[in-house]
């Protein structure tokens, strides 16, 4: 006979770092999980002290989940990155351990776009400089270096969710929009696709970065790229800190090549609010520096708290992996009157046949079954309609290339 209860929900331990929105705590608490919330990031050493007992981990952008941390995470079921990017997690290593990683690819899009629009308007009108002068008691009432955005060309580097929405809003302001992306993307509105990055840089009055954090994008904008830009360009980076050579940007601003810059992300960022911020971009003229707050609006953080948490709850409670960035995606129905077997394995031929052979040997009748693979990981979900012999579970675990087996009742 099978056990009649799943692992008790009130023994599932959730660790939420970096001031994740209270909505996440509410969702997990309503499931009766144990929730611990911390305001800052944890170092690798600190994570190694706590991760062995954690089942669900929620982070934002400052916490790094390394292969070493993952190897110590013996009970970890899933990871949630409460932001767009997942480059702070060793996602391939997580997949090989049967740990899906969930993120929020859309929830803060509008917030980032609005900040980009706002900074662009402030910089091209020279408002930031005039405001600082007025705080010093200097009344500079002139139109010098103040321009409208209407008729100007906005160059968007990276035409994903954020870049595409920025494109639409910029056009509504009367701007001409061009974009460059290594992936072939359909233009929205009247936006024009550029065939190379340098083509975009040469024709843009405003350049706005919206690429992802992959390693290949490191120093995508360097000395040579600033040289390709128009004299007097406005430059925005609200994507990832390492995609721009900070010293090259510093020189471009000091030389007047870039007359206004807005930067929200940096190669190194303080791990908490108590650590001082150091950067060669500090105190540069007409340069707006913000502390990685592109997605930090109440609306965005609430949406992210809901979205990522619910994805992880769905995975824990019913095995639903839809939305995982590193794991075979399966959107599953609820199940009643059945036992659900979740089998994660290396993606090699014959695993499904071995699983079903065992079900037949132990007289377990299959109600429904789902199989999905991604790269070198496979995921089989089977609902069986009868009690089963405990020996069957041991046999399933012994199938060669099995990564993880979890059972829901």
Image (tube, rainbow, N blue to C red):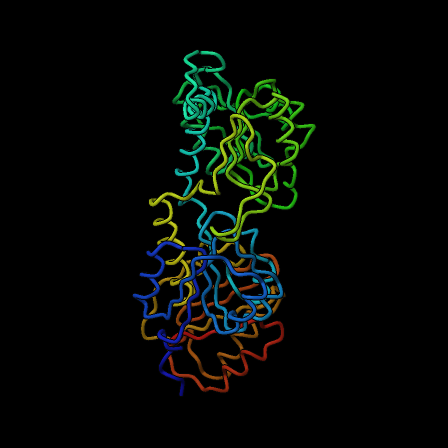
Name the image quarter holding residue 149: top left
Q: Which residue reaches farthest left? A: 30
In the displayed structure, 78 sits above or below 393; it is above
x, y percent for residue 51: 52, 69
In this rendering, does residue 121 appear at all? Answer: no
Q: How many marks?
A: 0
In-front residue for pair 332/36: 36
Which residue is at a point 45% across and 26% down the rendered structure image?
132
x, y percent for residue 363: 45, 83
Q: Is residue 307 left or right of residue 287?
A: left
In the rendered image, the quadrant that contains the N terminus is: bottom left
Q: Which residue reaches farthest front? A: 137
In-front residue for pair 10/266: 266
In the displayed structure, 10 sits above or below 230; it is below
In the displayed structure, 268 sits above or below 282; it is below
Which residue is at a point 39% across and 76% down the rendered structure image?
11
In this rendering, does residue 285 appear at all? Answer: yes
x, y percent for residue 62: 52, 53
Name the image quarter holding residue 408: bottom left
In the rendered image, the quadrant that contains the C terminus is: bottom left
Which residue is at a point 63% across and 26% down the rendered structure image?
252
In-front residue for pair 343/208: 208
Q: Is residue 189 left or right of residue 257?
A: left
x, y percent for residue 146: 46, 15
């Amino acid at each position: 006979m099978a056990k009649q209860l799943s692992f008790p929900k009130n023994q599932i331990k959730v660790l939420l770092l970096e001031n994740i929105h209270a909505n996440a705590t509410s969702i997990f608490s309503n499931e009766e999980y144990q929730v611990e919330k911390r305001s800052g990031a944890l170092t690798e050493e600190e994570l190694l002290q706590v991760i062995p007992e954690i089942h669900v981990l929620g982070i934002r952008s400052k916490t790094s989940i390394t292969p070493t941390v993952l190897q110590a995470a013996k009970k970890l079921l899933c990871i949630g990155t409460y932001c767009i990017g997942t480059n702070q997690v060793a996602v391939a290593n997580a997949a090989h351990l049967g740990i899906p990683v969930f993120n929020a690819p859309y929830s803060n899009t509008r917030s980032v776009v609005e900040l980009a629009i706002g900074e662009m308007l402030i910089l091209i009108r020279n408002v930031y400089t005039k405001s600082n002068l007025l705080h010093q008691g200097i009344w500079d009432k002139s139109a010098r270096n103040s321009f409208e955005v209407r008729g100007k060309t906005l160059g968007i580097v990276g035409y994903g969710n954020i870049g595409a929405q920025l494109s639409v809003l910029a056009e509504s302001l009367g701007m001409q929009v061009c974009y460059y992306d290594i992936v072939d993307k359909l233009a929205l509105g009247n936006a024009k696709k550029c065939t190379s990055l340098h083509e975009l840089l040469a024709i843009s009055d405003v350049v706005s970065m919206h690429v992802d954090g992959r390693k290949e994008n490191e120093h995508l904008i360097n000395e040579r790229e600033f040289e390709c830009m128009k004299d007097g360009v406005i430059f925005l980076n609200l994507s990832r800190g390492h995609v721009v050579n900070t010293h090259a940007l510093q020189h471009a601003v000091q030389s007047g090549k870039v007359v206004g810059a807005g930067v929200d992300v940096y190669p190194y960022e303080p791990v908490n609010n108590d650590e001082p911020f150091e950067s060669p971009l500090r105190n540069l003229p007409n340069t707006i520096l913000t502390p990685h707050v592109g997605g930090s609006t109440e609306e965005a953080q609430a949406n992210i708290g809901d979205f990522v948490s619910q994805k992880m709850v769905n995975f824990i409670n019913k095995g639903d992996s839809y939305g995982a960035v590193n794991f075979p995606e399966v959107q599953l129905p609820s199940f009643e009157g059945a036992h659900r077997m979740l089998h994660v394995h290396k993606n090699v031929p014959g695993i499904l046949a071995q699983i079903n052979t065992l079900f037949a040997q132990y007289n377990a009748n299959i109600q429904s079954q789902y199989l999905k693979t991604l790269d070198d990981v496979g995921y089989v979900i089977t609902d069986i309609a009868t009690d089963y012999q405990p020996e069957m579970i041991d046999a399933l675990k012994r199938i060669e290339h099995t990564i993880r087996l979890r059972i829901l009742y």
